[in-house]
Image (cartoon, rainbow, N blue to C red):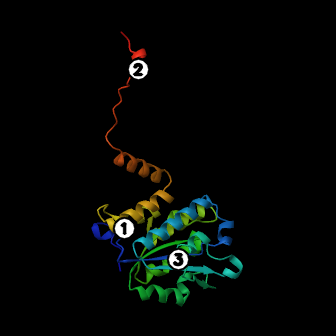
């Protein structure tokens, strides 16, 4: 399958996508230097919440969790009843449990984020692209051991056909129209909780929209204060 790079069909829709989140674990964060770690935490949790709002099948996976640590708790809390697929394979796409879970969804557009970008994201992305999937990499919900490692991996995946995005771009593309009220309010809540300055600006806009007509500003002076 050739990734559609332009036109309306190039944009993500909830009914076409599956999300795969790879190795957001304690050990992986200890050598994360391409991003400020708390930002990656914020972004991957926001991405997971967005997927849940839009009913996108989400696959969680860890590597050697008994040594590398369990899945990040705020991320696991988004899907409290889902047990992550624990692997020994460094390349997620070599684990049949993961690929079977993806195939079971019947979807061909895969959104992926992982730690680390240069290994745990690049390997499955490149292999999945070779097997005919369209792959969208969420760069700000991923990270590498250095900025160079992250950037070189993103370039390599793009050369193979992957499409780079950020979590907010993914969520906005899925919402697409504020008239979609069934998801709009929940999307706005995610934006408020995880959108940083964008969330603050959104709340301000809501305040302005909800403000009544400006009250009368003329001061009522007491008789003593009136100027004759």
Visible residue check, residue 52:
yes
Q: Is residue 196 left or right of residue 133?
A: right
Please, which residue is most extreme toward the top here? 228
Distance from the alpha carbon under mark 1 to that under mark 3: 18 Å
- Residue 209 on image: x %, y %: 34, 48
Asked which quadrant contains residue 212, the reply is top left
Q: Residues within 10 Å of mark 2 (few under 14, many from 20)?
A: few
Q: Secondary structure at mark 2?
A: loop
Q: Secondary structure at mark 1?
A: helix
Q: Secondary structure at mark 3?
A: loop
- Give the residue drawn at x 40%, y 82%: 132
- Give the residue drawn at x 61%, y 60%: 38
Which residue bears the numbered disc 3? 79
Q: Is residue 4 left or right of residue 114?
A: left
Which residue bears the numbered disc 2? 222
- Work out which quarter of the rendered image holds the N terminus and state it: bottom left
- Badge 1 vs badge 2, beta-carbon distance below 8 Å: no
Q: Looking at the image, is mark 1 or mark 3 earlier in the sequence?
A: 3
Which residue bears the numbered disc 1? 183
Asked which quadrant contains residue 61, the reply is bottom right
- Badge 3 vs badge 2, beta-carbon distance below 8 Å: no
Q: Residues within 10 Å of mark 3 (few under 14, many from 20)?
A: some
Distance from the alpha carbon under mark 1 to that under mark 2: 52 Å
Q: Looking at the image, is mark 3 or mark 2 earlier in the sequence?
A: 3
């Amino acid at each position: 399958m050739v990734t559609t790079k332009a036109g309306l069909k190039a944009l993500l829709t909830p009914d076409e996508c599956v999300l795969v989140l790879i190795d957001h674990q304690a050990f992986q964060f200890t050598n994360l230097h391409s991003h400020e770690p708390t930002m990656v935490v914020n972004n991957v949790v926001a991405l997971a919440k967005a997927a849940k709002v839009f009913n996108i099948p989400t696959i969680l996976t860890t590597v050697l969790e008994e040594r590398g640590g369990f899945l990040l708790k705020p991320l696991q809390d988004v899907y409290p009843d889902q047990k992550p697929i624990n692997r020994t394979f460094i390349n997620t796409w070599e684990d049949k449990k993961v690929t079977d879970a993806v195939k079971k969804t019947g979807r061909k557009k895969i959104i992926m984020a992982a730690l680390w970008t240069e290994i745990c994201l690049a390997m499955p992305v490149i292999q999945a692209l070779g097997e005919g999937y369209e792959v969208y990499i969420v760069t700000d919900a991923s990270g590498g051991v250095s900025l160079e490692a992250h950037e070189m991996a993103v370039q390599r995946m793009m050369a193979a056909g992957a499409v780079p995005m950020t979590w907010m771009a993914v969520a906005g593309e899925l919402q697409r129209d504020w008239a979609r009220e069934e998801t709009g309010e929940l999307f706005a809540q995610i934006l408020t909780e995880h959108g940083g300055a964008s969330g603050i600006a959104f709340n301000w806009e809501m305040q302005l929209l909800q403000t009544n007509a400006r009250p009368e500003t003329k001061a009522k002076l007491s008789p003593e204060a009136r100027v004759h």
